[in-house]
Image (tube, rainbow, N blue to C red):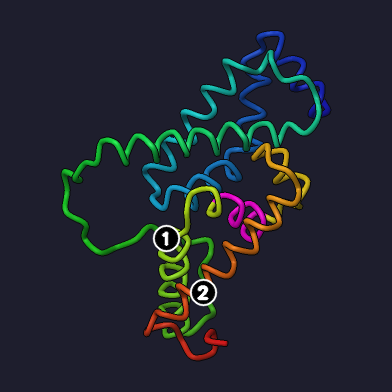
Amino acid sequence: MTEAEIIQAAQNGNLAAFNRLVMSYQGLAFNVAARVMGDADAAADATQEAFIKAFRAIKQFRGGSFKSWLMRIVSNTCYDQLRYERRRPSEPLEPDDGESDHSPHLLDPAAPPEETVENRELGDMLQYAINQLPPEQRLILVLSDVEGFNYQEISEVTDLALGTVKSRLSRARTRLRDILRTQELLPAKYRH
């Protein structure tokens, strides 16, 4: 079945077809949510909520890029959660043990331990810097530079004009660079 046929089946109430869409896009949706939210647990919640919203709204999908339509739902869900957290800040029940969530699939088993630690630290610094961006810039940067979306796709996801996407991406990259330059522990090879 083509993606269009799977979507049509999902619109006709076929749960297995919708589950195929979930399987196809869950990694992308979680990655975007994780970078925007800055927290794996919050990203998992946002991703799950976005798929529930997509399931409820699938009949409203009128063609075009399903990926863009779905990422718009994911990004809006993330924005909703971020706004909610700002209005109702909370403290975690468990103390932070200092260990961050890293995918073991991203580690190179042949890399020396020093390189593995350096890459992990660099990833933490990048996520810290991304978290400092305003949510609108954060989403555009993640879609472009992490997920590889083109300007047109980002425009569709965010419902922004192409020029606005380009200017926000430029501002996000500049701000990210400035934030990273202030990090004293950033390895010298990354300070240009």
Mark 1, secondary structure of its residue = helix
Residue mark closest to the camera, 2 vs 1: 1
* Alpha carbon separation for disc pair 2 and 1: 31 Å
**Residues under numbered marks 2 and 1 in contact, where contact means CB atoms less than 8 Å apart:** no
Residue found 72% across the figure and 38% down from its top: 156
Residue found 44% across the figure and 66% down from its top: 129
User: Foreground: 57 or 18?
Assistant: 57
Q: Position of residue 20 (x, y in %)?
A: 66, 28
Residue 151 left/right relative to 89: right
Outermost top residue: 12
Q: Mark 2: which amino acid?
A: Pro
Q: Quadrant of residue 23?
A: top right
Residue found 58% across the figure and 38% down from its top: 26
Crowding near pointer 1: few (<14 within 10 Å), some, many (20+)? some
Q: Earlier in the sequence, mark 2 or mark 1?
A: 2
Q: Which label belongs to residue 62? A: none
Residue under numbered circle 2: 109
Against 109, is 142 above or below?
Answer: above
Look at the image and tell me in which quarter the N terminus lies. Answer: top right
Residue under numbered circle 1: 132
Q: Mark 1: which amino acid?
A: Gln
Q: Position of residue 60 (x, y in %)?
A: 69, 15
Magenta stretch, main secondary structure, is helix
Extent of the magenta region: 139-147
Mark 2, secondary structure of its residue = loop
User: Foreground: 166 or 70?
Assistant: 166
Q: Quadrant of residue 2?
A: top right
Look at the image and tell me in which quarter the C terminus lies. Answer: bottom right
